[in-house]
Image: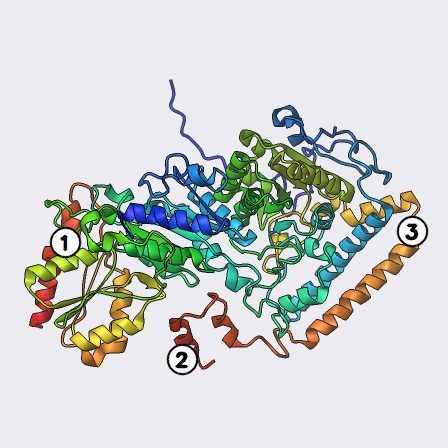
Amino acid sequence: MAQMTMIEAIQSAHDVAMDRDERVVVFGEDVGYFGGVFRCTAGLQEKYGSHRCFDAPINESGIVGAAIGMAAYGLKPVVEIQFADYMYPAYDQIVSEAARIRHRSNGDFTCPLVIRMPTGGGIFGGQTHSQSPEALLTHVSGLKVVIPSNPRDAKGLLMAAIDDPDPVIVLEPKRLYNGPFDGHHDRPVVPWKKHALGDVDDGHFSIPLGEAAIYRPGSDLTVLTYGTMVYVAEAAANETGLDVEIMDLRTLLPLDMDAIETSVAKTGRCVIIHEATRTSGFGAELSAVVQETCFYALEAPVTRVCGWDTPYPHAQEWAYFPGPDRVAAAFRAVMEA
Amino acid sequence: MTDHPLSLHVPEPGCRPGDEPDFSDFEVPKAGAVRRPAIDEAPEKMRDMAFSIVRVLNRKGEAVGPWAGTLSGDELKQGLRDMMTLRHFDDRMLKAQRQGKTSFYAQHLGEEAVACAFRRALEDGDMNFPTYRQAGLLIAGGYPLETMMNQIFSNARDPLEGRQLPIFYSSKDHGFFTISGNLGTQFIQAVGWAMASAISGDTRIAAGWIGDGSTSESDFHAAMVFASTYKAPVVLNVVNNQWAISTFQGMARGNAGTFAARGHGFGIPSIRVDGNDFLAVHAVAKWAAARARAGHGPTLIEHVTYRAGAHSTSDDPAAYRTKHEFDAWPLGDPVARLKAHLVTLGIWSDERHIQADAEILDEVMAAQKKAEACGTMISGPAPSPRSMFERVYAEMPDHLRRQRQEAGY
């Protein structure tokens, strides 16, 4: 075991995967010599050579399209889209190709491919370095979509994604790379090195795709969330003094519906939190699942706390971000309902 | 100074319905006139190859010049047979579509030589990333006609179990990547496959395919950048059949230069070939494949041909182009040209041609009979609806299992 940041955990996952399987190749913009703008691929080119870890031209459709060809050949490409906001040029390759190749060829060709992309805001990145496009990916049949909230999950989910026979999107909440950010932007963040979830196994281990985790058990209400918002929910729970059960979904597609049903049936109240814009966001799907499976257990309306339906702003970042105050207000409202 | 109001330039073809066909601005070099560079010649030294057209067969049916002689008499006879098979196959499937036995078809009329000759230049194990108009790759590769028809009829023996639009075949064993209807996407995938072969120290190469219209897509650019950057062992084919549904090829290239010349900015050797000349297509494909295999990287080939039929069963060309354009097309009919060559060689005759034509038609009809016995879209067994839930993923997730049960399968 070692104490790792989320970045180091992601590096370690790449390292272990490349070491145990020579079919694993890693590429993307700035990922080779430089090791990635967030350093998630640092040291790989030096260790495994430039034929297995290399820089790519600035063309996301090219990166994903080439990776699909490599996956069809029999390699296991793990590519980085530098920011999730840059995935749109690759969207056709992701939606119409990677996600569909197994089905459309009836299993003749497959696409075991991992696409990593830093997601979410909180770093003053403005509208082109802050987006959370998970709903644009969870709507696509044939994809799997994961989003870790801590170093241990980041490594375990990435290892599982690399071992998976189908295309997996790994959304990495960039605000969590160095520590569990709780939305109080005016306070220092506790680094992962001093956090229990920063304790990560050095070797190979994986966290199964499709399994949610109870981050914090409780009985008053259920929070369904993922990524950065896990810690925002925790801050709000502490500040309200409510006994909140926080479910870290970890995998958005396929969704752990049993875990959701069990928790909400127990608490009777549900708050859904995500940083992405509200309308047609992933929270809408979660809300529908809760309504379909837990309607008779509900004591209060299912409530969403999300980013506003605006482009992600720069100077107004903290007015946009669904921070602990907005989350706490939602907790109180569902308890009073 | 006067301010002139600006106006938008929208390219138009030389002729439209009602006009006489006009190819007067289409320059056709003499067969044998274009040089054959060494496969390791520097790309910047062979830019001339993008502005002429490699042709081997002359008007008398003789094979002439430095690109001649890549195929034996038997191989040429087989090539003719492949093209004739494809033509009969097209004809039968077009009729089957009109009879409602399938929902869609797209024929290859006039451009049969491109894929049939190209396939003969590849090795088993190489991988094509085709468009929907390269069924010649399958036919020349020995893929069963009956299986192709099963796919077209979405019947009980369709290897894709009804998932795909007719003619969107897939066969890994025959080096034929699953076809996408989103144009251009497969061009960069071919480059990725070739990169993977190079990464793995393999000897196999890839071939990408795209139409003249789809070169406008961003993925054409993506493929060219990646192929150029990594010197991928790939042959990139642009099939310029003059028409993208109703849009003439000038719309995709600003009506300037050639499609092959697009390779120059990427430092990719680029070459134009007479796509209706079976021998020329084979020779150029062989040359490009040899370059790839020897580690000299990608080649861009523009196959100059003509789509004599409709784009698909969903359009009527009479609405957008002049009726007798194919008759006026300067590069002629690939089947007639190869036949004339074989006759000139003394290894074929009109009588044998007529006989072969009848035999091939019988084979195609026999395959169709067998396929139809397994069902068409108006009769017989179809794939189970249960199948649509399968192989979305390697393992069916719970939510799909629940939906399948909800649907009653």
Rendered image: mark on residue B406: 2
Q: Is residue A85 above or below residue A259?
A: above
Query: Residue at 27% of width from left, 63% of height from top?
Result: A249
Locate the N terminus of chain B and report the quarter of the image it occupies: top left
The amino acid type, in three-letter code, at marker 1 is Gly
Q: Residue A160: x and y, percent?
A: 39, 59
Dot 2, crowdedness within 10 Å: few (<14), some or many (≥20)?
Answer: few
Q: For numbered disc 2, what is the local secondary structure?
A: helix
Q: Circle 1 is placed at which residue position? A: A323
Q: For numbered disc 1, what is the local secondary structure?
A: loop
Mark 3 on the same chain as mark 1: no
Rendered image: mark on residue B349: 3
**Is residue B257 shown left or right of residue A38?**
right
Give the mark nearer the N terminus: 3 vs 2.
Answer: 3
Viewer can see residue B330: no
**Is residue B341 shown left or right of residue B378?**
right
Q: Residue B85: x and y, percent?
A: 77, 58
Q: Is residue A336 above or below residue A138?
A: below
Q: Chain of mark 1?
A: A
**Residues marked 3 and 1 touching at CB (< 8 Å):** no
Circle nearer the viewer, 1 or 2: 1
Q: Chain of mark 3?
A: B
Mark 3 on the same chain as mark 2: yes
**Residues marked 3 and 2 touching at CB (< 8 Å):** no
How much space separates mark 1 and mark 2, taking CA atoms? 40 Å
Dot 1, crowdedness within 10 Å: few (<14), some or many (≥20)?
Answer: many
